[in-house]
Each structure stands twice: as structure tokens, then as C-alpha cells.
Image (spheres, rainbow, N blue to C red):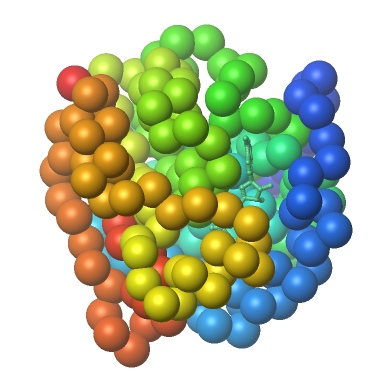
Amino acid sequence: MKNNAATETIATDAGAGSFYDSIAHLYDLTFRFNQYGRSLERYLRDNLLPLPANAAILDAGCGTGLLTLALLKVLERPAHIHAIDLSASSLVKAQRAVMDNFPHTKHSASFAQANVLALPFSNDSFELIVTSGALEYVPLEDGMAELARVLAPGGYLLHLPVRPSPASKLLEVMFRFKTHPPRLVAEHTSRHFRVVAHHRFLPFEPIGWTKTAVLAQKI
Ligand SMILES: C[S@@+](CC[C@H](N)C(=O)[O-])C[C@H]1O[C@@H](n2cnc3c(N)ncnc32)[C@H](O)[C@@H]1O
């Protein structure tokens, strides 16, 4: 669907009921307050990806849609964004935010409840995969392998892993995840991808207290 609301929901049989169902509202409020979305937009604008028109994009573990919204704002060419998450409540929030903010757009966005470890997409489906703060909930090796499976050869992975810091220690407790050591992130990334750039956010951006951005291309 295009040029109108730009959303559709795909039902999958992935299990519901993640922790995020109960905290989707709090998560969304907190992360809007700390300008996380703005930082994502700034990063994407400053590091425009060489995507073809009508590129298929996956937001893996989209949560309340902050990355999808940033992509819809900055992408110049029409794109088709598929956003998946385990949390039904987060998906509802994400879908509503897209409908409210982008009632008319050249892009399309679809939302599905799915597990990043068993994505309901065939091999080589996407030109770009973005994922932020989701692989911290799964074994890194398995998550990376599944993302690599659905990314087309030459396609890009934009991974915003949590980086170890005093702030991320607090978030680990609040949001019940485990930060993967940067050494392991580098190791598992290099099994499937060639790292193109590693970005550290500016000190005044709260996103930089807990995240970095790794852009990699599928080998
Ligand atoms: C910290 S939030 C990040 C959300 C969003 N990417 C963002 O940057 O705001 C982590 C998200 O990962 C989702 N998640 C956790 N494990 C998952 C899995 N195995 N498959 C899909 N989503 C998962 C959670 O439901 C939650 O919405």
C-alpha cells in the first residue's frame, strides 16, 4: 500500500507476550524524551545509504518504531519498510505513529509480530536491515546469522549495538537485556559482513551514552 497511511499488518504465528508488551508506553515516552529519534534521523541524514528506489528494508526488533520513523523521514527514494517485533503492544504503537506522522508518503511500512531468530522472509529479501537494541535479547551468533540470511548480497546492515557503559548497565537492569561485548559483536559481524563504518555519536547526544552504529555490507 502506498500514499495513504502507508501501513499494513501482516499476521504471523510468532509468539506474543514479551516483556515489552507491558512497558511499550514507558519505553516510547522515555526514548522520545531523550531525543533518540532525532539522533537517529541526524545520523541517517549525515550517512545517507546508497539505496535503489523501492528498496526493501527490514527494521528487526522495531519496538515502538523509532528507527522506522527516522527512515521514513530521511529516505529520499521510495522504500518498503518491513518492521518486526515480538511485542504486539510495541507494534501497535509503531503502526499508529507511522499513520499519525505519515498519512501521505511515497514509502510503505508494514508491521508483523515475528522473532528475529526465525524471520518470516525468504533468503536475500532486503537491501537494508536496521536493528537497534534487539540483538541484545538473543544469542548474537544466531541473530546475526538470521539477519545475514535475509539480507541480499551487497546489502547493508545498520546495527546499533548497546556499548558497555555506566548508562547501559542501568538500562540492562531496567530493560532486562545483556550487552554483547564489542569484541564478540565485531567477531560475529565479520562472519557475514564487511564493516564499512563504525560511528560514535557526539557526546551531547544521549544515544551515544549507550549505543554505537556499525554499518556493514553482506559479503
Ligand atoms: C530496546 S527495544 C529497541 C526497540 C527499537 N529498535 C528502538 O531502537 O527503539 C528492544 C526491542 O526488541 C524486541 N525483541 C526482543 N527480542 C526479540 C526477538 N527475539 N525478536 C524480535 N524482537 C525482539 C523487544 O520486544 C523490543 O521491542
Specify the farthest residue to the bottom.
204
Q: Residue at x 28, y 40 (%)?
A: 184
Residue 124 location in percent, x, y? 40, 15
Residue 112 as seen in the image, left or right of residue 140: right
Total number of numbered discs in the rendering:
0
Q: Is residue 151 visible?
A: no
Q: Residue at x 26, y 80 (%)?
A: 202
Residue 182 as seen in the image, left or right of residue 142: left
Q: Quadrant of residue 47?
A: bottom left
The one of 15 and 180 positioned closer to us in this rendering: 180
The vertical placement of 67 against 59, above or below, is below
Residue 201 location in percent, x, y? 28, 73
Q: Is residue 91 visible?
A: yes
The vertical placement of 65 against 82, above or below, is below
Residue 15 location in percent, x, y? 80, 28
| Quadrant of the rendering where the N terminus is positioned | top right
Residue 159 as seen in the image, left or right of residue 175: left
Q: Quadrant of residue 123?
A: top left
